[in-house]
Image (cartoon, helix red, strand yellow):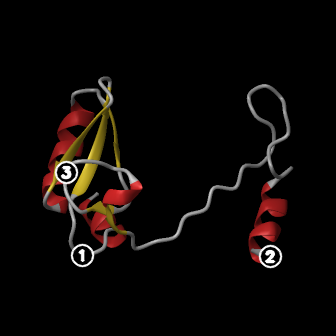
Amino acid sequence: MLKFLDFIYPRGGVRCMFEMPGKFNTYFSTTEQLCTALSAATAAGKDVYHACGTFKDGTSRKQHNAAGYKSFWVDLDCGLDKHGAQKDYPDQKSAILALGQF
């Protein structure tokens, strides 16, 4: 996990873990600290997530506090949703073709 997180995080900033239940954020100065916390929370049966970017400080995950991102992500919704309604694209091929036009 450390190798993956080191790969996706830019230099500098604090890292964030989001934990459920409770819906709260915990911030860490280093990727190693984040990995230790993620592993411990997972071992305790908690659902945890990590932010993919870094933040200026440990006050918020909102845009105004973003310090940096090393990647660009896209979310292409394909197929049907849980109610049977068509999402943005009928299938992955259509979504990838649309991405190419972006």
Residue at the image point whose x is 34% and y is 50% from the top? 61
Tell us which disc is closer to us: 1 or 3.
3
| Mark 1 to mark 3 CA distance (whole Å) | 16 Å
Is 71 displayed left or right of 33 in the figure?
A: right
The numbered dot on residue 11 is: 1
Residue 76 in the image: x percent, y percent? 70, 55
Q: Quadrant of residue 39?
A: top left
Amino acid carrying mark 1 in the image: Arg
Amino acid carrying mark 2 in the image: Gln
Residue 29 in the image: x percent, y percent? 13, 59
Kindly state the secondary structure of the residue where label 2 is placed. helix
**Circle 2 is placed at which residue position?**
101
Residue at the image point whose x is 36% and y is 53% from the top? 51
- Judge whether 61 appears above or below 100 on screen: above
**Circle 3 is placed at which residue position?**
58
Count residues near mark 3 (Cα–Cα under 10 Å), then give few for <14, some for 14-19, many for 20+. some
| Mark 2 to mark 3 CA distance (whole Å) | 38 Å
Residue 65 in the image: x percent, y percent? 31, 58
Count residues near mark 2 (Cα–Cα under 10 Å), then give few for <14, some for 14-19, many for 20+. few
Tell us which disc is closer to us: 2 or 3.
3
Q: In front: 3, or 26? A: 26
Q: Quadrant of the C terminus?
A: bottom right
Is 45 displayed left or right of 100 in the figure?
A: left
Residue 81 in the image: x percent, y percent? 76, 34
Residue at the image point whose x is 33% and y is 72% from the top? 7
Q: Quadrant of residue 40?
A: top left
Q: In front: 79, or 56? A: 56
N-terminal label among 1 and 3:
1
Kindly state the secondary structure of the residue where label 1 is placed. loop
